[in-house]
Amino acid sequence: MTTRDDEARASQFALFKSIKFAPLFLTMFLGAFNDNFFKSAMVILITYRLAGMSGVDARILVTLAAGVFILPFVTFSALAGQLADKYERSGLVRKIKIAEIIIMAGAILGFRLGSITILMIVLFMMGAQSAFFGPLKYSILPQHLDKSELIGANGLIETGTFLSILLGTIFGGIFVMRDGGVLIVSLLVIGIAVAGWLASLYIPPTRIIDPFMEFRFNLLRETFALVNNVRPRRDIFLSVIGVSWFYFVGGTFLSQFPTYAKTVIGADEQVATLFLAVFSIGIAAGSLACNGLLKGEVSGRYVPAAALGMAVLSVLLYAASLRPPLPDDAPLIGAWQFVRTLPNIAVLLCLLGISFFGGLYIVPLYAIIQSRSGEDKLASITACTNIMDSLFMVISSLAATGMLTLGMSIPQIFLATAALTVIAAWVIRGAVREVNFHNGSAPHV
């Protein structure tokens, strides 16, 4: 006779058969896909068509777009945490999905008019609805699932998140520049939003945490309060910082792929897309591998080693990137030419290894936060995580910009990231030591 723990360890994919997980996963997957599908289509359209028509530098607009999407996570996460505690969470998800449909109607108008202003407003609103969805997504899981299922569920969530980012980014760029592509994209963003709303109808109800909560609308003060409230519990706070460090590393690599492919490798946009695909697949594989390694146990024992793995592979990527300078008139190679040489295969293997260890690294941290936070605090702690993630992504962008300004090469940025990740591994080792992950006896926050 098998126990529930044995069943959870046997296959995390059994969660896809559960009404407690599958609708939430599908809602999340479609939402993340739509975010990146729209964002990719918008960036490509601005770069190759709208920027030239408006007379504005495309690089400025694309950089602005990245900030416009991240800003709502900093601005609204505190309010999102309050909403998640005051109201029933599955009902809030459905309202957010209805909002997504309305926002995507605005996207159709922006595409139809070719208006950069409208598209930027829509991008901000999409970031806002994602910011409100984040605390719900992670705080619903521990209400519906057993502790032994959290590692497997978070592995699937992270896998789905990065695969949806990959697919949305690729297809958004492919479709928008085709004949009739703007119409195709317009119809798809609405259709995907509707599908996400339909999936959300099947998410089971959750317990209401604090129905008598009074909203606190000083968002700046509440944002600082969220962080300060988590800080006394060093185990959880260090886990939050650990998650945010993953976004620092991921943001650094993902933002440099296009320029790295062109200026270091001498390759075209196909190879930049290949880097994104390999990185996403690696994170997905690492996320799925967590459940097998930990056998359903919520434990951070592999997290420091995974951080060191990311650092070591980043050093190897630096070594694989040491090549003679490219001639100014050298033609750019495509994906097929790229994969035909061993040094380039080494680059792909390094990226795959970095991202695989990234998946092993982040999934246990999310599960730790969920399992060790009291039910009445989890939504606000998740909101705090969103704020810190956004802050670290901004810092990664500023740090990369600063290093490039100082004359550092992109491989040197990867090397600097490796050195910083070694320090992060030491900090996360402290989090593992703070929490007695082996017996789970520490009190909830």
Image: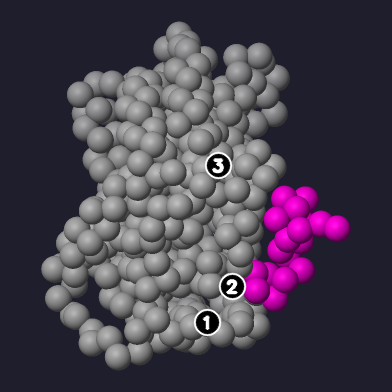
Circle 2: element type: helix
Mark 2 vs mark 3, CA separation in Å:
23 Å
Q: Is residue 249 above or below residue 92?
A: above
**Residue 289 x %, y %:** 66, 41
Q: Amino acid at mark 1?
A: Thr
- Seen from the viewer's position, the closer of residues 114 and 141 is 141
Residue beneath disc 1: 206
Q: Amino acid at mark 2?
A: His
Is tag 1's residue or tag 3's residue first in the polypeptide sequence? 1
Contact, CB < 8 Å: mark 2 with mark 1? yes
Question: Which dot, 1 or 3, sits closer to the camera?
Answer: 1
> Which SS does the magenta portion mostly show?
helix
**Residue 191 x %, y %:** 62, 78
Most distant residue in the right direction: 1
The part of the chain drawn in magenta is 1-22
How many neighbours does mark 1 have within 10 angstroms: few (below 14), some (14-19), or many (20 or more)? some
Residue beneath disc 3: 359
Circle 3: element type: helix
Is tag 2's residue or tag 3's residue first in the polypeptide sequence? 2
Circle 1: element type: loop
Q: Amino acid at mark 3?
A: Gly
Residue beneath disc 2: 144
Is tag 2's residue or tag 1's residue first in the polypeptide sequence? 2
Q: Splitting the image into 4 quarters, where does residue 445 fall? A: bottom left
Residue at 46 percent of width and 72 percent of height: 136
Q: Splitting the image into 4 quarters, where does residue 18 fall? A: bottom right
